[in-house]
Amino acid sequence: MSAASAAIRDVGTNDVPLVVDVDGTLIKSDLLYESALQFLARFPLEAWRLPHWLFTEGKAALKQHLSERADPSIATIPLREETVALIRDAQAAGRPVYIASASDRRLVEALAERVGGIAGVFSTEAGVNLAGDAKARRLVAEFGEKGFDYVGDAAVDFPVWRASRNVLAVAHGGDFSQKVRAAFPDARIVAESRVKPRDVVRALRPHQWAKNALVFVGLVTGHHFDAASTLASLTAFVCFCMAASSAYLINDLLDLPADRIHPRKSRRPFASGAVPVLYGVVLAAILAAGAFVLSFGLPVKFSLALLIYLVLTLAYSFYLKRRMMIDIVVLGGLYAIRVFGGVAALGLPQTPWLLMFSLFLFTSLAIVKRCSELTANHQGEQPGEKKTLAGRGYSVEDLRVLFPFGAAAGYGSVFVFALYMSSPDVAALYTHPNRLWLICPLLIYWISRMFLLSNRDQLHSDPVVYALTDRISLATGACVAAVLAISL
């Protein structure tokens, strides 16, 4: 028997209503945070309105404004299975079920419609934030003292539990369970929800840190292998990992409605409800601040590169990713900034050859990333159907143009490398510079293979991450390293 069924079994007569809280209880999220995030995603330049509404008009007004201007997509927010089971058991027993929430009425009514069979809703309206004592007074006025059972999940629900007949709780940790049972010995814990450390780590997307290995390019190409240079590059790597995770957290929080309807992205920690969205906001701020504090031990140019990287990623998350071709230029730029940041961390001047090579190569990789997403989206398309990439400015018809664009950019990087062979810089760094020509066919092979894999829908991740985990790509990289070694 489920915890929900056990909780329902002995609650008494069938005419006593069951009242269910929303945030953290019925849903695995919080409607206020969800609404605020979608408001920011839609109106990033109006972020100042959130504190303005809160401190000048109050929390109830803030929720009303957000419900009018932001859509948290109620239909996609994950429900808590144990609470839904509790509701279904009560309905099967003939008991009326109500939803009581501090969220705005429009959102609560939409949630009630989604759940089905709800007798009525109580919500924030008319300037009254329906939480804590205000919720308790409202329910007592409706059902009488001890005239209802209530299921909640937070300390703010204690006044409501004191007025209810039976205390039913969703516990988000062992300490909270003990506090509830200490105050209400007969309380029933209908569900226990704990944030698992591995889910928090997964939200940071550590597999994407592989892209930050690009900061070591300056170390390798400049032949700076001393201890100080190695330590500087490692510090730069850590800074970019922290900044990148901060950006990924923000991007995931803004993309929640779209991620939740995606077959793969719906399993992400925030989209699935495994990690509360507030955790993401706090972690993003801590990681961004930590990255900049750590960067102060490196040259100022590196801190500037890190700042540009973070500003671009935020602009990308809020707006630029929906702009056709601009998103590709930005993605390519984000790859390149890692390289330039690595050079800046060593205190070396930026070379025009590295600038040109990075421009072409990383634009090519940004295009192949979009091509992979479009190719995956194309699978299962019905004849005559025009599919678009959700949240992006492309349709599958653009593949016929993007593939040539990407290949041209990739081969352009090889051309720049070939020109570099004739520069005096090569003679200064290598004893046998002519041997470096062997790298050109290796680059042509690798770039061509990446586009073929993308066309076959076999490139399911970021191309840089894929290259660092793909055996053939690693073997190609080893061959490039061997050529560099015999050219010294």
Image: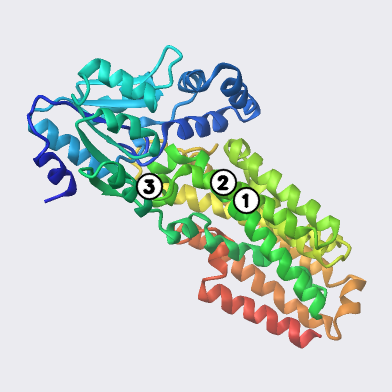
Crowd band around label 3 with a 10 angstrom C-alpha radius: few (<14), some (14–19), many (20+)? many
Q: Pointer 1 and pointer 2: residues touching (CB < 8 Å)? A: yes
- Dot 1 crowding, Cα within 10 Å, few <14, some 14–19, many 20+: some
Which residue is label 2 attached to? Answer: 282
- Within-10-Å neighbours for mark 2: few <14, some 14–19, many 20+: few
Rendering coords of residue 129 (x, y %): 43, 21
Number of numbered discs visible in the structure rendering: 3
Q: What residue type is labelled 1?
A: Ile
Q: Can residue 216 be seen in this view?
A: no
Q: Point out residue 181 in the picture as x, y percentages from the top left corner.
A: 28, 46
CA separation in Å, label 1 and label 2: 6 Å
User: Relative to the observer, which residue lies in front, 415 or 305?
Assistant: 305
Q: Report which quarter residue 136 is drawn in.
A: top left
In the picture of the structure, the residue carrying the numbered disc 1 is: 286
Q: In the drawing, does residue 193 fall left or right of residue 336?
A: left
Give the distance between the C-alpha atoms of the residues marked 3 and 2, in whole angstroms.
18 Å
In this rendering, would 336 be left or right of 2?
Answer: right
Mark 3: which secondary structure? helix
Write down the quadrant of residue 462 in the picture.
Answer: bottom right
- Mark 3 or mark 2: name the one nearer the start of the chain: 3
Secondary structure type for disc 1: helix
Residue drawn at the location 42% of the way across and 51% of the way down: 268
Q: Identify the residue at the far top of this view.
A: 126
Residue type, mark 3 in image: Ser
Q: Please give the label number shown on residue 272.
A: 3
The answer to which of marks 1 and 3 sits earlier in the sequence is 3
Q: Nearer the viewer, residue 193 or 34?
A: 193
**Are discs 1 and 3 less than 8 Å apart at CB?**
no
Question: What is the number of the mark on residue 213?
Answer: none
Q: In which quarter of the image is residue 4?
A: top left
Q: Is mark 2 on a helix, strand or loop?
A: helix
